[in-house]
Amino acid sequence: MIRVMLVDDQAIVREGLSSMLSVEQDISVVCQAASGAEALRLVPIFRPDVVLMDVRMPDMDGLTTLERLKGRHPDLCVIMVTLYDDPDYLYRAVSAGAAGYILKDASREELVNAVRTIAAGGAIISPGMLRDLLARIGGLVDASTRERTHGPDVGLTAREVEVLKLLAE
């Protein structure tokens, strides 16, 4: 049984997600939280396998809550569920340790698939947002490669390079 926690400041959204998931034999919504602070308090009590959390909430946003949850429970699987297809939110969520990022207009089938995929150790990102994330990662890789291949030529001896490597370790 996959134990799910729902975190959203809007009760109607929590109830809708709960209704969508409750018909599945292998998924159980074990608790709901209306805020990030409440989520931080309830996770150790209910020990969910997967947390579905909104990105924007009034008291503590989902990204801050995600960082704090992952700091306290590094193995916890969190899926950000949001209206916002903002690449910056996606990048921050992935950087903070989210295992998934799906939009609230996803179908019930997509939601259920996301929960099962994440619970099995996978990751999921709304397909429409994947291109933005890959472009951003590609840009980071390009910048890193340029820095390494076009850095200053200082002419260090083999021993100096060895000493620098040891210092870096």
Image (cartoon, rainbow, N blue to C red):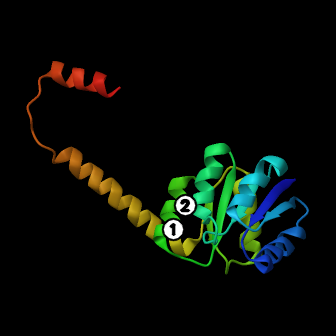
Query: In the rendered image of this protein, does residue 149 appear above or below residue 108?
Result: above
Q: Secondary structure at mark 1?
A: helix
Query: Looking at the rendering, which quadrant does residue 108 occupy?
Result: bottom right
Quarter of the rendering occupied by the C terminus: top left
Query: Looking at the rendering, which quadrant does residue 112 occupy?
Result: bottom right
Q: Kindly report the distance in space between the C-alpha atoms of the residues bearing marks 2 and 1.
A: 6 Å
Residue at the disc numbered 2: 93
Taking the image as shown, residue 169 lies to the left or right of residue 19, namely left
Q: Residue 118: horizontal and vertical position, in percent? A: 69, 56
| Three-letter code, disc 2 | Ala
Q: Nearer the viewer, residue 19 or 53?
A: 53
| Res. 131 in view | no
At x 79%, y 54%, the residue is 42
Q: Residue 137: horizontal and vertical position, in percent? A: 40, 59
At x 27%, y 55%, the residue is 143
| Res. 44 in view | yes
| Three-letter code, disc 1 | Tyr
Q: Residue 40: horizontal and vertical position, in percent? A: 71, 54
The residue at the far front in this view is: 59
Badge 2: residue crowd in 10 Å (few <14, some 14–19, many ≥20) = many
Query: In the rendered image of this protein, does residue 75 appear above or below residue 161?
Result: below
- Tag 2 near tag 1, CB within 8 Å: yes
At x 63%, y 72%, the residue is 58
Taking the image as shown, residue 130 lies to the left or right of residue 162, namely right
Taking the image as shown, residue 21 lies to the left or right of residue 142, namely right
Numbered label attached to residue 89: 1
Q: Nearer the viewer, residue 168 or 65?
A: 65
